[in-house]
Each structure stands twice: as structure tokens, then as C-alpha cells.
């Protein structure tokens, strides 16, 4: 069984960010069930935990700044060199 990719059901202007070395739950500060089920279902990845938290924050701040505030100064984080 392979779960459907939720991104395929989104509408523009959505972005998908893949973090090399991160698992499905690494970006969360407090993982529900961390001591019970979560580590067996989605074990931690090899990426540095702080990097995994920082990268989504950068994308979210840039996206909100661009689409909600109309300020394109951070657009490069999701549509430019910084996004690479």
C-alpha cells in the first residue's frame, strides 16, 4: 500500500519542499506518540534536526510574505536560487 501524495491534490500557488535526509515527522518540535509509535512508523532521518526545522520556516515565511503581504523580496526562497 502506498499512500497518495497530498501535494497532487493541492491547487496553485502551492509549493512542495523536499528536505534531503529528513523523515516525515522530523520537522515537528513535539511529536505526538514519540515514545510509542512514531519512531517505528517514521524513524528519524539523517539530516540535522535544527536544519530540518529551519528550512520549512524559511519557505513558510517567504511564501506568506509574498502571497499575503505582496512583498516579493523573499520570492527566491521558493522560486529562485535560494530554493536550490
Image (cartoon, rainbow, N blue to C red):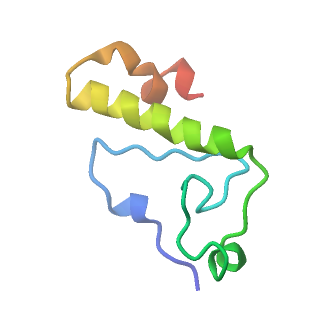
| Residue at the outermost left position | 69
Q: Viewed as shown, does residue 43 lie left or right of 14?
A: right
Q: Measured along the vertical axis of the image, is residue 37 above or below residue 82? A: below
* Residue 63 x/y as whole percent: 34, 33
Residue at the image point whose x is 54% and y is 60% from the top: 30
Quadrant location, the C terminus? top right
Residue at the image point whose x is 33% and y is 63% from the top: 9
| Residue at the outermost right position | 46
Residue at the image point whose x is 58% and y is 47% from the top: 18
Q: Measured along the vertical axis of the image, is residue 1 above or below residue 16? A: below
Q: Measured along the vertical axis of the image, is residue 3 above or below residue 29? A: below
* Residue 49 x/y as whole percent: 69, 46
Q: Viewed as shown, does residue 79 lie left or right of 11?
A: right
Q: Nearer the viewer, residue 6 or 25?
A: 25
Q: Viewed as shown, does residue 54 lie left or right of 50?
A: left
Q: Nearer the viewer, residue 19 or 7?
A: 19
Q: Viewed as shown, does residue 81 lie left or right of 79?
A: right
Q: Measured along the vertical axis of the image, is residue 49 above or below residue 59? A: below
How many numbered circles does the render carry?
A: 0
Q: Nearer the viewer, residue 74 or 33?
A: 33
| Residue at the outermost top position | 73
* Residue 23 x/y as whole percent: 66, 59
| Quarter of image, res 59 | top left
* Residue 43 x/y as whole percent: 72, 68
Residue at the image point whose x is 79% and y is 52% from the top: 46
Quadrant location, the N terminus? bottom right
| Quarter of image, res 28 | bottom right
Amino acid at each position: 500500500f502506498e499512500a497518495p501524495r497530498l501535494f497532487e491534490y493541492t491547487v496553485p500557488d502551492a509549493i512542495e519542499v523536499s528536505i534531503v535526509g529528513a523523515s516525515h515527522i522530523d520537522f515537528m518540535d513535539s511529536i505526538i506518540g514519540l515514545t510509542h509509535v512514531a519512531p517505528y512508523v517514521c524513524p528519524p532521518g539523517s539530516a540535522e534536526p535544527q536544519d530540518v526545522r529551519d528550512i520549512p520556516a524559511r519557505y513558510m515565511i517567504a511564501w506568506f510574505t509574498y502571497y499575503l503581504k505582496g512583498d516579493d523580496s523573499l520570492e527566491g526562497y521558493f522560486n529562485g536560487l535560494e530554493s536550490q
